[in-house]
Structure formats: structure tokens, C-alpha cells
Image (spheres, helix red, strand yellow):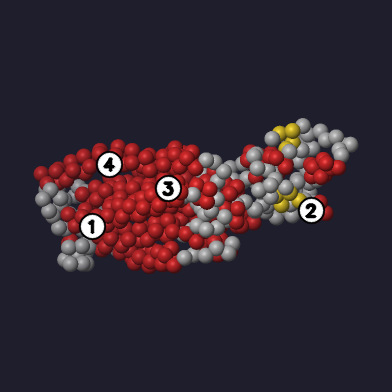
């Protein structure tokens, strides 16, 4: 609650502590705030010219209004979100029903996108297939002719059918999430106080969206393999981008519910990524890479600021940068967050600079590689921080993560075989054709489908179960990182 910044010098004993707090340098690194009773203690001897943003500003500061800390610590976002030691309780204050509706929009949006995306895609690829069957022109579609198994209308039924793994495992994951969701709702009805006090807040909208995205990856990849060529390459990669980003968003959501991105902005970001992929394939030039490099740098900087200050960038900027009383050249206020974001920016800038130097032929795959690298980086950071904060990783998520890494490694070895390449001429592409690998029916790319679907399922299960060890821990004792 805002109050007048003027403080009476004749404050009595009852208000003496409050006046002393209001006049103290509030950004001391050794300041601590109690989130339960609103009390705080300040080590004034350790006060420095740089003031770490546990709260946004001193009430006697000239550059902004004051705060009644004893009350605003539990009410004002600029106060409690900029604390040094955030807990899940600090970032899960919004009502359960309101947040649940917000996160459920994620899977409703992906269902809507899937319907409107899939229908014209099916029509297009079946039209391609009919033209191939009628004309006999083998240059329209890029098949592995040494292991091409036609069936009825389809010229390469094996390449289409092998995508069933994505669809079946996607449905299985949806059912597993549905089971957890149902059990969580039952516990919430029986004991609402405990459910809102212990463990990670149980919202499953993004997990449902991940399951639907895995299913749709199978549908879109099957459509692409009806007639793979330059014109429909994005069918095979669009949902791969979405799956990679959704996995990162889910991990971030677990401890940042109140500051989490709304589904509308997230899907706008998905659209921007897919649009960039299409433009990068069509206009493969150094000029495009320069524009991409600048856009990538700006996006990384903006995202880093939002993550570092928990969405309170304006307040932090006003206090830490515009105020002449602060020394911004001191050590980071949030060291672990700072380290993550520094590594994040170095990795992304390195990948972008490498692209502009070498200009890879397949920009779509290169962009997917950037997303995968960021996903692996965040998963690694999340696991390290869990152990750093004294949390445990149970057997099930550990097994899932190990199985995921093994299957990813094996599947990528099949993916890089390069049986066909739509960036080359049809004649050049046929030079990479190889015989069937399994049962005289499946080639190396079919095995990539099966193994990558299994790897994604294990990855999803790891994300689903990674915080099961916190179910009986109070949210006030679960750190945010």
C-alpha cells in the first residue's frame, strides 16, 4: 500500500522501528524479508552504494513514491517479486481457478491450430500424391527408392506408417496427464488447504498441450512423407519447434506461476519462429542472416531482462539504472539467475554468429538445433539447481531422463544418414538412397521416427515427474530458480 514519503521526526516508540526501516538503505545485500508476517530486518552496517532490489525503492527516495514495507511486502508485486530469496509461495499467490483457466488455454489453442493447420495440409499432400500416381513423375516427391513400399494410394507407405509412434505415445502421455489431473482435483476437493500449501502448484494445461503437440507431430510428419519436397518441408518441423519450446515453458512454469507467459503471447512466438523458418529457407542469403542475428540478439536480451527481474523490468530499471545513488557495476543481485542468462546468451550468440559465417543449407534444421540446445541447457540448469537447493530427483524421473538421452543419441545417428535431400535436385538426392534396415520394410528414417518418438515420450515423462519429491514440502520452503 503506497503511503506518503514524509516521515515524522517525533515518531513514538510504537513507530520507531518502522521509521528506522523506512530510512535504512533498503537494497542491502544482507536484507531479509519474512513473507508470512511482513517483518524484516536490515543490516545497516553492511549497506552499500549499490542496493539489491528486494524492494523497489526507499520511501525517502526522490525518484519514486514510497512503500509501507510492513504491509506492501505481501501485497505489492514490485516488493515481493524482487526479493533476494524467492519461494514458490511468493509466485503462486493468484487463485487456483484463475491460473488453471489461463494454462488450459494452451491446449485449447493447440487443438484449434491443429485443426485449421491439418485440413489444408492433408488436402495438399493427397493432391500431390494423385499427380504423382497419374503422371508417373518421380521428380515431384523425394522418396528413398531403394526402400519404397507402396500401398494403395500411397507411394511410400512405410515412411508414412512409421509416424504412428508419435501419435500413440502422444495419446499415452495425454492419458497419464489426465490421470494425474484427476487425482489432483480429488485431493483438492478433500483437502484444499494442503493442496494450496504444499508442493508445486498442480496445473496441467501445458502438459496436455505437449501431448497434443506430440500427436500432431506424427500427423504432420506423416503428411510430409506422403510426398516430401521443398514446398511442404515445414509440415515436418512446425510442431517440433512447438514441442521444444513447450517443454522449456513447462519447466519454467513449475516455479513461476504468477509471472508466466499467457498462451496468446506464447503462440504468437510460435508463429514468429515458424515464419522465420520459412523465410530462412526461401531467402537463404547473408542479408537474411544479418537480420536474423540482430533479431536473435534483441530477443535474447529482452527475454533475459524479463527472467532476471521476474517481469518487473520497469521498476528495476527505474531504481537500479536511473537513480544516481546506485552503483550498477557491482556483483549481480541474483547470482544463479545471472550465470544461467550469461550462458544462455553466449550459447545463442555463438550459434547465430556461426550461422552467419557458414550459412548452413538447411535453416529449418539449424533453427530446430538452436531450440534443442536451449532446451538441454535449461534442463541441465534445472537439475543442477534442484540438487544445489537440497532437493532430490526420484527414481522415475531419473530413469526417464537417462532413457531419453540414450534414445536421443541412437535416433540422431539414424537421422543424419541423409537418405534423401530436398535441397538437392531429384537425381542428386537419389544418390543417398539406401536399402531397408529393419524387416525389409523400414529404412533408417523410419527408425528415426520410432526412436525420436520414444525419446520425446521419455523426455515428457521426466518433465512431468521431476518435482514429485516436493509433494509434501511447503511452498514457503521451495526455492525459485
Of mark 2 and mark 4, the one earlier in the sequence is 2
- Residue 366 visible within the image: no
Mark 2 → mark 1, Cα distance in angstroms: 64 Å
Give neighbour class at mark 2: few <14, some 14-19, many 20+ (Cα, 10 Å): some
Task: State the image coordinates of residue 201 (x, y, percent, origin top left).
Answer: 50, 49
Of mark 4 and mark 3, the one earlier in the sequence is 4
Mark 2 → mark 4, Cα distance in angstroms: 61 Å
Q: Secondary structure at mark 1?
A: loop
The N terminus: image quadrant: top right
Task: State the image coordinates of residue 447 (x, y, percent, origin top left).
Answer: 26, 62
Front: mark 2 or 4: 2
Mark 4 → mark 3, Cα distance in angstroms: 33 Å
Per the rendering, the mark at residue 162 is 1
Of mark 2 and mark 3, the one earlier in the sequence is 2
Mark 1 → mark 4, Cα distance in angstroms: 18 Å
Residue sitting at the far top: 4
Is 378 displayed left or right of 151 in the figure? Answer: right
> 110 and 8: which one is in front?
8
Q: Secondary structure at mark 2?
A: loop
Q: Are marks 3 and 1 in contact (CB under 8 Å)?
A: no
- Residue 7 visible within the image: yes
Is 210 displayed left or right of 232 in the figure? Answer: right
Mark 2 → mark 3, Cα distance in angstroms: 44 Å
Residue sitting at the far front: 190
Per the rendering, the mark at residue 43 is 2
Front: mark 2 or 3: 3
Front: mark 3 or 1: 3
Task: State the image coordinates of residue 57 (x, y, percent, origin top left).
Answer: 73, 41
Amino acid at each position: 500500500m503506497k503511503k506518503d514519503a514524509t516521515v515524522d521526526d517525533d515518531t513514538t516508540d510504537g513507530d520507531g522501528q518502522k521509521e528506522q526501516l523506512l530510512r535504512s538503505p533498503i537494497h542491502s545485500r544482507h536484507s531479509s524479508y519474512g513473507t508470512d508476517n511482513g517483518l524484516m530486518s536490515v543490516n545497516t552496517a553492511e549497506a552499500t552504494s549499490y542496493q539489491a532490489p528486494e524492494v523497489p525503492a526507499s520511501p525517502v527516495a526522490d525518484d519514486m513514491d514510497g512503500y509501507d514495507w510492513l504491509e506492501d511486502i505481501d501485497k505489492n508485486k514490485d516488493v515481493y517479486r524482487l526479493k533476494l530469496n524467492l519461494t514458490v509461495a511468493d509466485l503462486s499467490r493468484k487463485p487456483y481457478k484463475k491460473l488453471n483457466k489461463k494454462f488450459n488455454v494452451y491446449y485449447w489453442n493447440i487443438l484449434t491450430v491443429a485443426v485449421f493447420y491439418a485440413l489444408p495440409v492433408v488436402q495438399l499432400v493427397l493432391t500431390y500424391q494423385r499427380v504423382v500416381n497419374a503422371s508417373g513423375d518421380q521428380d515431384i516427391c523425394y522418396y528413398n527408392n531403394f526402400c519404397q513400399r507402396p500401398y494403395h494410394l500411397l507411394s511410400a507407405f512405410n515412411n508414412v506408417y512409421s509416424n504412428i509412434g508419435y501419435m500413440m505415445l502422444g495419446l499415452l502421455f495425454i492419458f497419464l496427464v489426465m490421470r494425474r489431473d484427476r487425482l489432483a482435483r480429488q485431493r483438492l476437493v478433500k483437502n484444499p488447504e494442503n493442496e494450496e500449501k504444499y508442493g508445486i502448484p498442480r496445473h496441467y494445461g501445458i502438459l496436455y498441450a505437449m501431448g497434443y503437440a506430440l500427436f500432431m507431430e506424427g500427423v504432420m510428419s506423416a503428411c510430409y512423407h506422403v510426398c516430401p519436397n521443398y514446398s511442404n518441408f515445414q509440415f515436418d518441423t512446425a510442431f517440433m519447434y512447438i514441442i521444444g519450446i513447450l517443454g522449456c515453458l513447462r519447466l519454467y512454469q513449475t516455479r513461476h506461476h504468477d509471472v508466466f507467459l499467457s498462451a496468446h503471447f506464447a503462440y504468437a512466438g510460435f508463429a514468429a519462429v515458424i515464419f522465420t523458418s520459412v523465410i530462412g529457407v526461401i531467402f537463404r542469403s547473408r542479408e537474411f542472416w544479418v537480420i536474423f542475428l540482430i533479431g536473435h540478439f534483441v530477443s535474447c536480451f529482452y527475454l533475459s531482462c524479463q527472467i532476471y527481474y521476474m517481469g518487473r523490468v520497469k521498476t528495476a530499471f527505474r531504481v537500479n539504472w536511473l537513480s544516481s545513488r546506485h552503483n550498477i557495476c557491482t556483483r549481480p543481485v541474483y547470482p544463479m539467475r545471472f550465470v544461467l542468462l550469461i550462458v544462455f546468451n553466449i550459447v545463442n550468440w555463438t550459434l547465430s554468429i556461426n550461422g552467419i559465417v557458414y550459412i548452413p543449407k538447411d535453416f529449418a534444421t539449424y533453427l530446430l538445433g538452436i531450440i534443442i540446445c536451449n532446451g538441454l541447457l535449461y534442463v541441465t540448469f534445472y537439475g543442477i539447481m534442484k540438487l544445489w537447493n537440497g532437493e532430490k530427483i526420484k527414481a522415475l524421473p531419473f530413469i526417464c531422463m537417462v532413457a531419453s538421452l540414450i534414445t536421443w543419441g541412437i535416433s540422431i545417428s539414424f537421422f543424419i544418414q541423409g537418405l534423401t535431400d530436398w535441397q538437392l535436385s531429384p537425381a542428386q538426392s537419389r544418390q543417398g538412397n539406401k536399402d531397408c534396415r529393419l524387416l525389409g520394410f523400414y529404412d533408417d528414417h523410419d527408425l528415426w521416427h520410432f526412436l525420436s518418438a520414444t525419446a520425446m515420450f521419455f523426455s515428457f515423462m521426466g518433465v512431468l515427474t521431476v518435482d514429485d519429491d516436493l509433494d509434501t514440502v511447503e511452498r514457503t520452503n521451495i526455492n525459485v530458480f
